[in-house]
Image (cartoon, rainbow, N blue to C red):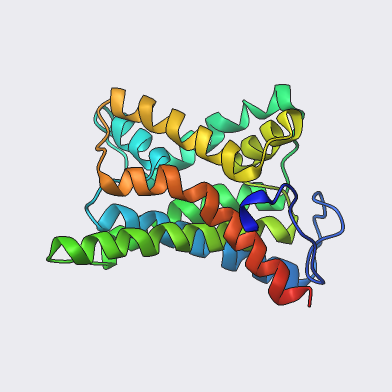
């Protein structure tokens, strides 16, 4: 079962080491594809108007007091999360840097060009698609093995010291973050709950699908 996955699988396009600063084209391509899907999913959840993802709720809460876009604040939050890597002994790579940049850009692009569905059912459907898109994107870019993004590096570091399933660790992080974001004034809705409880299984599913497709 994909929910029991504890390790990120390897494929022919995975980098042999996370700190490879001259990766193959295929590795870099899948990395950027995964990050673009991840950012697209984050943006789709926001425009679904059912509530943002936990990390975007945090960004919204901060944005109430500063004049920056959600994407820009997301970038600042990512930099802040990197500081939490220090006690977990995680190290950044190309994927870490591109994660912070591409996701922030995709969120702002999505908010600008994708309209919000007119009826509530369509909004819920879009929210579900958004969570699955983030999970698939997360699975693809993690397998590239060019360094996890700020949030996923935190997830991996906590998983390594706890030996708990990835799905459980990610769910714990998302639920904790949304609580802080809500306290700061961020908008919480059913889409937020879908993301908080669904992103762990969605990322695990993404890893499972990548493993099955590329390791037959």
Residue 172 location (% of width, % of height): 52, 33
| Quadrant of res 113 | bottom left
Say which quadrant the C terminus sits in: bottom right
- Comparing 213 with 75, the one in front is 213
Relative to 9, is 61 on the left or the right?
Answer: left
| Quadrant of res 139 | bottom right
* Residue in the picture at 24% in, 31% down: 64
Whether residue 35 is visible to the viewer of this picture, yes or no, is: no
Check the image and report above or below for 85 versus 4: above
Residue 192 location (% of width, % of height): 33, 44
* Residue in the picture at 24% in, 37% down: 187
Residue 110 location (% of width, % of height): 34, 62
Check the image and report above or below for 1 versus 4: below
* Residue in the picture at 78% in, 70% down: 13
Q: How many marks?
A: 0
Relative to 32, is 102 on the left or the right?
Answer: left
- Comparing 71 with 35, the one in front is 35
Instruction: Give the residue at the far right of this rendering.
Output: 16
Whether residue 173 is visible to the viewer of this picture, yes or no, is: yes
Check the image and report above or below for 13 versus 187: below
Relative to 15, is 65 on the left or the right?
Answer: left
Instruction: Give the residue at the far front of this rendering.
Output: 1
Residue 39 location (% of width, % of height): 46, 57
* Residue in the picture at 67% in, 31% down: 158
- Comparing 96 with 6, the one in front is 6
């Amino acid at each position: 079962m994909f929910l029991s996955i504890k390790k990120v699988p390897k494929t022919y396009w995975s980098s042999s080491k996370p700190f490879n600063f001259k990766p193959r084209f295929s590795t870099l391509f899948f990395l950027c594809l995964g990050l673009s899907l991840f950012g697209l999913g984050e943006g789709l959840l926001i425009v679904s108007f059912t509530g943002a993802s936990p990390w975007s709720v945090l960004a919204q809460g901060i944005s109430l007091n500063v004049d920056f876009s959600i994407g820009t604040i997301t970038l600042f939050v990512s930099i802040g999360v990197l500081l939490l890597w220090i006690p977990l002994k995680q190290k950044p790579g190309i994927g870490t840097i591109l994660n912070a940049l591409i996701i922030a850009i995709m969120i702002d692009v999505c908010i600008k060009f994708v309209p919000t569905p007119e009826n509530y059912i369509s909004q819920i459907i879009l929210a579900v698609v958004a969570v699955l898109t983030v999970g698939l994107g997360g699975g693809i870019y993690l397998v590239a093995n060019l360094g996890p993004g700020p949030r996923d590096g935190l997830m991996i570091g906590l998983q390594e010291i706890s030996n708990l399933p990835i799905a459980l660790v990610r769910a714990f992080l998302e639920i904790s973050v949304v609580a802080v974001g809500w306290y700061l004034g961020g908008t919480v809705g059913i889409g937020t709950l879908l993301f908080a409880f669904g992103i762990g299984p969605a990322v695990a599913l993404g890893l499972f699908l990548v493993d099955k497709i590329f390791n037959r």
